[in-house]
Image (tube, rainbow, N blue to C red):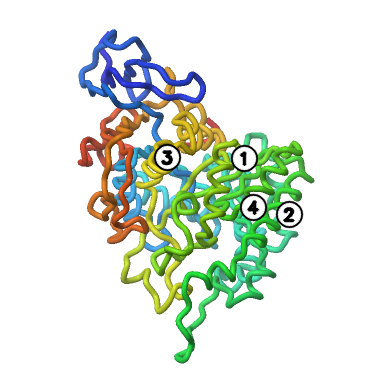
């Protein structure tokens, strides 16, 4: 039998089966064989000798369509993702209107433009959204959601909804998810706004700087959003989920502080079956080096926080890695000072390379653990497994062929995003894909995008 594609002579890495030498073949978009080196043939072959073959990375935490149209982000950012071996993204998407009425338009924007697969995770902003959950799950194939604690008390003004997203809203939200007949996941933005709002202006409402206001550096963000306010909120949200027997579906997004990670470890040791995610910027940057380019909520923190997060990634406390990716331009991003700058920055393309460079090559985690936190665990948390997140016969042929020794300097030109800057500009990173394969199609090869727009599609769940 001749297969459509064979990735030959590589070292395959899977958490389920470890690391082994094999050829991986693909036919009709699926993995069709995993065989001894040299034992299968393909119409197209990639020589992966000396390289590692990983399941395509999954970034579960992006915000496509937040600063530009969804169509624009789908087209440009999915190309950029291929540079970093990412073959699937999850888009945290929020709009105030009825999702039943508006999502058709957004699918129409997305489907012709994605170079890889994608899925939506919908932010619910009102009780009307809660009532739509059965339709969203059954008709739209969306099973993952988000509760934005940072919009508590400001949702009505920011979004024009008749809801302040207090705990009664969250209670109804969780109960509705728990009532579904299929697995669902609740992403939870941990933030005690009673604390953070008291420490500075509410960042989610439009405010203007006073003409005589002094310059505020990155410490202003860290002081307004202390780690303990994140930790307390995470515990509170997880406790509410447990009251409705939904604790194992609770997913704490972008854990940024060592305090939160340690509390997460305590809860897991006590038998709480919840999932924690951190982002690459919390693992690779510190507040001391951060500037206007790095405005994000929660903020980048200290070197001590960074090392605690790495320890919690290594010991299994933190299960998934995301990026909180937003595509914006430097001219729009950079404000009068750090808090005045636009929150969010582009980073999906650097997710896997940074984990390989700072995690695997620096000895903080094993290569198998890197695959778990950038692919396999994420697929499981977002109800994608085993379609995604693994190298096995019958799964989607999403692969990243990686050279662990390849060193590159991060530049916007390298990353091919529409954004004209990167939060990692000038950084040397070791460990990059040479090829990215999406559903059996070579989509990125030696620095060039060779895939097709529209090859990606929405992943309807449950799988």
Vertical order, 388 against 351 (above or below): above
Residue 448: tell me if it is visible: yes
Residue shown at 53% from the left, 59% from the top:
302
Q: Give the CA distance from mark 1 to mark 2.
A: 18 Å
Q: Give the CA distance from mark 3 to mark 2.
A: 35 Å
Crowdedness near tag 3: few (<14), some (14–19) or many (≥20) residues, C-alpha within 10 Å: few
Relative depth, front residue between 463 and 151: 151
User: Does label 3 or label 2 sit earlier along the sequence?
Assistant: 2
Residue shown at 55% from the left, 35% from the top:
383
Vertical order, 47 against 259 (above or below): above
The answer to whether 341 appears left or right of 75 in the picture is right
Residue shown at 56% from the left, 47% from the top:
309
The percent position of residue 366, horizontal first and vertical second, equals 47, 31
Determine which residue is flagged by label 1. Answer: 317
Determine which residue is flagged by label 2. Answer: 236
Identify the disc placed on residue 260: 4
The answer to whether 48 appears left or right of 462 in the picture is left
Is there a contact, CB below 8 Å, between mark 1 and mark 3? no
């Amino acid at each position: 039998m001749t297969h459509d594609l064979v990735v030959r002579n590589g070292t395959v890495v899977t958490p389920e089966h470890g690391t082994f030498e094999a050829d991986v073949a693909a036919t009709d978009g699926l993995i069709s064989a995993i065989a001894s080196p040299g034992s299968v043939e393909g119409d197209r072959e990639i020589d992966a000798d000396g390289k590692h073959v990983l399941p395509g990375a999954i970034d579960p935490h992006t915000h496509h369509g937040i600063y530009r149209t969804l169509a624009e982000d789908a087209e440009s950012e999915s190309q950029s993702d291929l540079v970093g071996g990412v073959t699937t993204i999850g888009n945290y998407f929020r709009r105030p209107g009825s999702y039943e009425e508006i999502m058709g338009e957004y699918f129409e924007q997305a489907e012709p433009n994605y170079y890889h697969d994608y899925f939506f995770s919908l932010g619910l902003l009102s009780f009307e959204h809660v009532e739509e959950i059965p339709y969203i799950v059954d008709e739209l194939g969306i099973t993952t959601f988000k509760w934005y604690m940072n919009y508590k008390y400001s949702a009505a003004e920011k979004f024009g909804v008749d809801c302040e997203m207090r705990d009664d809203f969250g209670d109804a939200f969780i109960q509705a998810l728990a009532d579904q007949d299929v697995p669902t996941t609740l992403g939870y933005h941990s933030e005690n706004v009673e604390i953070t709002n008291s420490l500075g202006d509410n960042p989610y409402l439009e405010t203007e700087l006073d003409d005589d206001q002094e310059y505020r550096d990155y410490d202003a963000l860290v002081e307004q959003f202390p780690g303990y306010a994140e930790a307390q909120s995470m515990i509170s949200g997880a406790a509410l989920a447990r009251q409705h027997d939904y604790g194992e579906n609770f997913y704490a997004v972008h854990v940024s502080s060592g305090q939160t990670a340690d509390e997460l470890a305590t809860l897991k040791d006590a038998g709480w079956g919840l999932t924690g995610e951190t982002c690459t910027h919390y693992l690779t940057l510190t507040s001391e080096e951060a500037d206007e380019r790095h405005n994000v909520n929660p903020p980048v923190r200290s070197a001590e926080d960074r090392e605690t997060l790495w320890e919690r990634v290594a010991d299994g406390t933190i299960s998934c890695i995301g990026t909180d990716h937003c595509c914006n331009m430097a001219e729009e991003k950079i404000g009068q000072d750090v808090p005045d700058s636009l929150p969010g920055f582009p980073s999906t393309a650097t997710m896997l390379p940074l984990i390989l460079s700072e995690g695997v090559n620096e000895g903080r985690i094993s290569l198998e653990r890197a695959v778990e936190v950038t692919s396999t665990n994420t697929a499981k948390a977002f109800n994608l497994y085993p379609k995604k997140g693994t190298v096995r016969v019958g799964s989607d042929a999403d692969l990243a062929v990686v050279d662990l020794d390849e060193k590159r300097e991060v530049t916007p030109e390298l990353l091919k995003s529409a954004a004209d800057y990167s939060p990692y500009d000038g950084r040397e990173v070791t460990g990059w894909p040479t090829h990215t394969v999406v559903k059996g199609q070579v989509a990125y090869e030696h620095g060039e995008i060779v895939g097709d727009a529209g090859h990606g599609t929405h992943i309807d769940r449950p799988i």
